[in-house]
Every structure is written in C-alpha cells, then in structure tokens.
Image (spheres, rainbow, N blue to C red):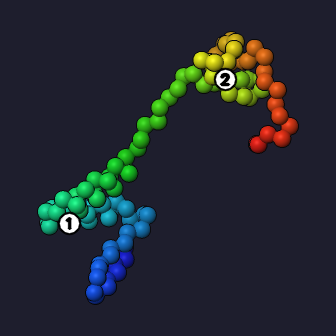
Amino acid sequence: MKIYYNKDSHLIIHFGVHEFKAGLATLKGMAKFFKMDFIAEAAKEGESDLTVKKLSYSPHHHICVLCACEIDTRKDSYVQQDGEFRHQICPVLKLNRPI
C-alpha cells in the first residue's frame, strides 16, 4: 500500500494487485465509518470484479477428429460415432492459414 498526499488537492491510497482484498476491506470500513454512499459503491464494484463469472456452454460446437476443424452441429453436415464427431466431407485446409 502506498499513500500519496498533495497538500493542495488530493490524497491517494494505492493498493497493489496482491493487496486488492485488503483494499476492499479498507473501503468497506471507510464506508461504514464515514457513511458515504460513493465509497460503498466503489467497494461493491471491486467485489463484483472478484466474483467468478460463469461462462455459457454451447453444446453445438465440436472438433472433427479427422481434420481438427470446428463443427457447428446446427449448420454443418457431420457424423457422430462413439462420441466422436466427423465431417461428412472435411473442408480443404488453406496452406497459409494462421496456426
């Protein structure tokens, strides 16, 4: 934690990345003590950044076992055997494609 003080204009309390939870606890304490809504809002925003976001799962995308290209089961023609997905006709790979 670092504290910067400019006599004429402002005070900055700087918490590093590894001190983020301590910074949130400090903000919560300041919000309770001073009863200022903007401090509590900043603490809530910080907490929302710490929560794990759930990613959506799409069961429509698979990888072809022959050509390793993506198969979208809603659009592409494919064959499914024993849990493996294969194109009926694999697309032609470009020579200068990105890796």
| Residue that carries the numbered disc 2 in the rendered image | 71
Instruction: Identify the image quadrant of residue 25.
Output: bottom left
Labelled disc at residue 30 = 1
Instruction: Give the crowd class for mark 1: few <14, some 14-19, many >=20 residues within 10 Å.
Output: some
Q: Residue at x 53, y 26 (%)?
A: 58
Instruction: Identify the image quadrant of residue 78.
Output: top right
**Numbered disc in front, either 2 or 1:** 2
Residue 57: x %, y % from top left: 50, 29
Residue 34 in sight from this viewpoint: yes
Residue 84 in sight from this viewpoint: no
Cα distance between the residues tagged 2 and 1: 53 Å
Tell whether 36 sits left or right of 44.
left
Tell whether 34 sits left or right of 80.
left
Residue 71: x %, y % from top left: 66, 23
Residue 77: x %, y % from top left: 69, 14
**Considering the image in quadrants, where does the N terminus appear?**
bottom left
Tell whether 69 sits left or right of 47.
right
